[in-house]
Image: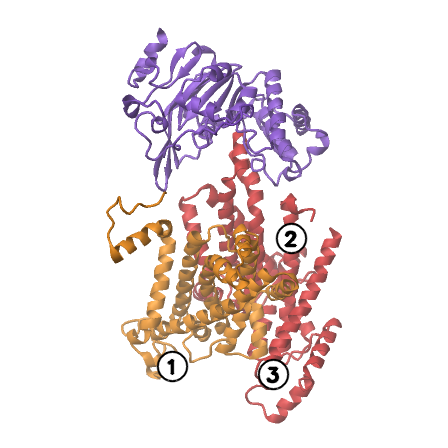
Amino acid sequence: MNTESSVLEIRDLKIHFDTFEGRAQVLDGLSLRLGRGDTVGVVGETGCGKSITAKAILGLLPVPPTRIVSGEILFHSQDLLRLSEKETEKIRGNKIAMIFQDPMTYLNPVLSIEKQLVDVILGHAGHAGRPMTRKESLEKAIELLEAVRIPNPRLRIKEYPHEFSGGMRQRVLIAMALAGDPEILIADEPTTALDVTIQAQILRLIGDLVQRFGHSVLLISHDLGVVASVCRRITVMYAGNIVESTTIEKIFEEPSHPYTKGLLRSIPNLSRRKEALVGIKGSIPDFIDPPKGCRFHPRCDYAMDVCRQEKPILNEIDGDHQVACFLFKSSWFHGNPAKYEDNERH
Amino acid sequence: MKQYILKRLLLIVLTLFGLITIIFVISRVAPGDPARLAAGPDATEEMVEVLRKEFGLDKPLIVQYIDYIRGLVTGNLGRSLRTRHLVLDDLIQFFPATFELTVFSLLLAVALGIPLGVLCAVYRDRFLDHSARVFSVSGVALPMFWLALMLQLFLALKFDFLPVGGRLGMLTEAPRSITHLYLIDSVVTGNWSVFKDALRHIMLPAFVLSFPALASIIRVNRAEMLEVLNKDYIVNARAHGISKVRITGHYALKNALIPTTTMIGLRYGWMLGGTILVETVFDWPGTGLYAVQGAVFSDFQPIMGVALLVGLNFMLANLIIDLIYGVLDPRVRYE
Amino acid sequence: MGERNATTEAQPVGALGAWAQWKEEHESLFRDIRLSFYLFSKSPLSVIGMVIVGIFFLITLAGPLIVPFPEDATGAVHMAQKLRYPGSGFWFGTDEMGRDIFTRVILGTRISLRIGLIIVGVAMGIGVPLGITAGFVGGWLNEVIMRITDIFLSIPGLVLALAIIGALGPGITNSMIALSLVWWPGYVRLVQGKTLSLKEESFIEAARSVGASKARIIFFHILPNCTSPIIVKASMDMGMAILAAAGLGFIGVGAQPPSPEWGAMISIARNYLPNWWWYAMFPGLAIFITVLGFNLLGDGLRDILDPQSRGYYRE
């Protein structure tokens, strides 16, 4: 995967959070790449920092108590972290759009669907320098509702969020995200708050839309199954770091990072009877006092001395397969970022 | 909708009856002799007896109660010992002054309070927010009558910026009565000098009356705005590029106004009660002053009349507030 | 955590050991208390409120011992010193009977405290049991109680108090009765609402399923969960009750002269404006600071005890 075609690149992002009990070092040098037309899933357990990463991209984190310590988020080689509020507003929804998790709380309860959609559409039109009339934006809003398969859109658009079901509301959120014809869609746990049957519908919808319109997608979830149904690549996140990144096929065939292996093992398999449920021993680390070296080492069956002292960095072990683990000799370079560049050129 | 309003109006009437019953029970159950109180400390036994007969206080409790209710239904609220007029006539005479004062004060509190609350939330912890916070906290604790006296002292008595009291200057003639509200009537009849005079006279009492309400509204609106601005749907709106101004002024405010409206309703009630104090200090010829004079003279009928009027006023205001909820919050609309 | 294995760890014995073990078991309670103090101290206004209320209580206790002219609080008359400007000897000046205003203001705290405590105490004493009964028993009893409560709340407090005083006659006792009747409905609403929502909680169901008696449920489960909002409301109400009583005193239907109640003092002082302005100013200042203190304290308590509530009951 070469740098030139990447639409979004997060480099070495470090984000800390001030809390009552101290400073939580949530993201600790996170690096991620999204290429044009890629569909990448970000998988990790609750609390590993996935949502924070997504919100950081659009500048939605409240600045105290959040501190963006270092790193870059490059969108077409523009660092999003260095943009002013006004410039960021132009990007939000327009170039990079987000689909949020809980359709119950992410829609304004006192405004009609029409109002909320039309506002977004008019805003984007204004930013793009092609202002629309209300009538035109209403038509576009109805089109969007049709695209997300809401029945009777002309009627239902006048209604309020509490009159819609959970699945329908999520479709409205998706419609909102499509309103600005964005290049990138970031979906933050889009199905977690929905029933299982609705989940499947929504995922199918997202998959179809992506095929139709060709967005680059970052799909965040704690559920491997959800990610597998939409994405071609998968990134595994643990405690604020990316630990493995590869294609969907390879992650199931050759999971390499011990955490990934643990995740896959813990998925209950209904066809294999009489098997005890396997979990990963231990629990996620305290961000305020994180483990030295590799953050996973306290839970890792293969932990070595170096793991307790140095932090492994993502490195290519195979074509299109990167892992951050000292088990793979190519990661054995004592965490020096300069050496990372070095390795790239080979 | 019409059904809802009718139901509420019926409830208001029933509540007023309940109120009368309760006051009646309290007044008759309590120790003390109303006739003697009304006659005053210098009255002879005969005078007390005459008063007792005149006010039907020698009849059994139930009869007195029924008489009062019957009188109420026909519009007879009794007669004031002090003014010798029918209480109803007195109320009609004094009500417009109080109505003008309370409505003006309410508008003042709301028109200033809501924007200030929003600004305090947006510019959180800056100078404006801190000073408003100090104001809000002290505003509710400040005794209205004391504030009234202090302002009267410094602005009117010592430095003659504003009038000491009354609705109009001694030499000013009241405008032609259309609504009996001097501010409106003088504008409608094009009488600008009277308007100015009426405005100057209402300034101090209205400011004092609105003070605690203003303090509360700023506080609540600020708190609600802060809470709403943290909500997920605001994050969503930001994530889709809606401008900060629109988010604050529309997306957030509409939600924050819902609890703020509750506070406005509550504070209006305290305002109605506060007329008792403020009208006394400023000699404002309204129902509050009328009630206080009644209380000082142990003249019960006027007090009862004012209480019922204020109760009606307050309950109608609450009805309007509930209707406003329907406008603001679509979730309560189809109850 | 698993069981403590007493044989593998060196345990202090006897009373010290029991104390250490109790501390361990109540670790989370201590953490809560520490967090509460931390949060409370974070708000300087709350601390100020607490200080003011503390000083208020101190003054009520020590009042008669520290004032220069204790006899001025009751009927003393010193016409030679009447209406003196504040200065040495008479820090707040003197009133129309030559009495030291500073003394009267200080001793007025006792009256205000008494008024506040009685009003809030009686209101709680009536309102809380009625509220729990209404919420717990439900049905027609709940309807009746709540409708009566609604009637009391249908009219602004000060007006209702005036009407009741009109029926009873003026005086400080009657004004306390009137204001207690004005304040009790607020507690009924608060407690009834809390009881209703607690009733639905699963721990109540659990208690009932193991056979806990109604009384036990009320006293051990419902009441403790109500104490936080009640405490918050009571501290806010103290201030407001004192304010209302002063208002009634100002009109002339509350405390009567020569009682050094602040409202009554201002009512007389009104006749001596503008020349002898200090007479009206200092008692009013005392009311303001006292009420402010209780309000700030109540706010601070609410932030740590009951952060979800927004205080939209009769303030």
Q: Is residue B256 something one can see in this rendering?
A: yes
Chain A, hue in figure: purple
Chain C, hue in figure: orange
Q: Which residue carries the number 1 mark?
A: C74
The residue type indicated by label 3 comes to Pro
Residue B288 position, x and y percent, is 58, 69
Chain B, hue in figure: red
**A276 shown above or below C217:** above
Tell me the SS state at disc 2: helix
Viewer-proximal residue among C70 and A24: A24
The alpha-carbon separation of the residues under discs 2 and 3 comes to: 39 Å
Residue A5 position, x and y percent, is 47, 11
Instruction: Write the residue at 25% across / 49% down.
Output: C11
Residue A8 position, x and y percent, is 46, 18
Q: Which residue carries the number 3 mark?
A: B34
**B24 shown above or below C42:** below
Instruction: Write the residue at 59% across / 85% down.
Output: B33
Q: Quadrant of residue A101?
A: top right
The residue type indicated by label 1 comes to Thr
